[in-house]
Image (spheres, helix red, strand yellow):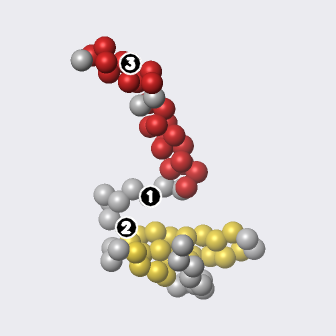
Amino acid sequence: MLTLSRKKGESLVVNNNIEVTILDIRGDQVKLGVAAPKEVPIYRKEIYDEIHESNKNAVSMEGMEALKKIF
């Protein structure tokens, strides 16, 4: 993991087309602004994990059995 120090108002660029800016720092909370192309999905980590888990469950054994019945 790359660790960077940034101050309020400073940014970093990812993959030449995503800019992450530190908007505010209050105590242990940091507000980030993300500028990225519309086709780039951006999720909070906990939401991303829920989506991933849901997708994994959809392809569980029940999903595989349903596919077998189709074919």
For residue 68, what is the image quadrant? top left
Label 2 neighbour load within 10 Å: few <14, some 14-19, many 20+:
some
Which callout, 1 or 2, points at the residue further toward the start of the chain? 2
Inter-mark Cα distance, 1 to 2: 9 Å
Task: Name the residue type under label 3.
Answer: Glu
The residue under the point 51% across, 40% down is 53
The residue under the point 38% across, 18% down is 65
* Residue annotated with mark 2: 36
Inter-mark Cα distance, 3 to 1: 33 Å
Q: Are marks 1 and 2 in contact (CB under 8 Å)?
A: yes
Which callout, 3 or 1, points at the residue further toward the start of the chain? 1
* Residue annotated with mark 1: 42
Q: Could you tell me residue 20's position as x and y percent?
A: 47, 74
**Quadrant in which the N terminus appears:** bottom right
Q: Could you tell me residue 25's position as x and y percent?
A: 66, 76
Label 3 neighbour load within 10 Å: few <14, some 14-19, many 20+:
few
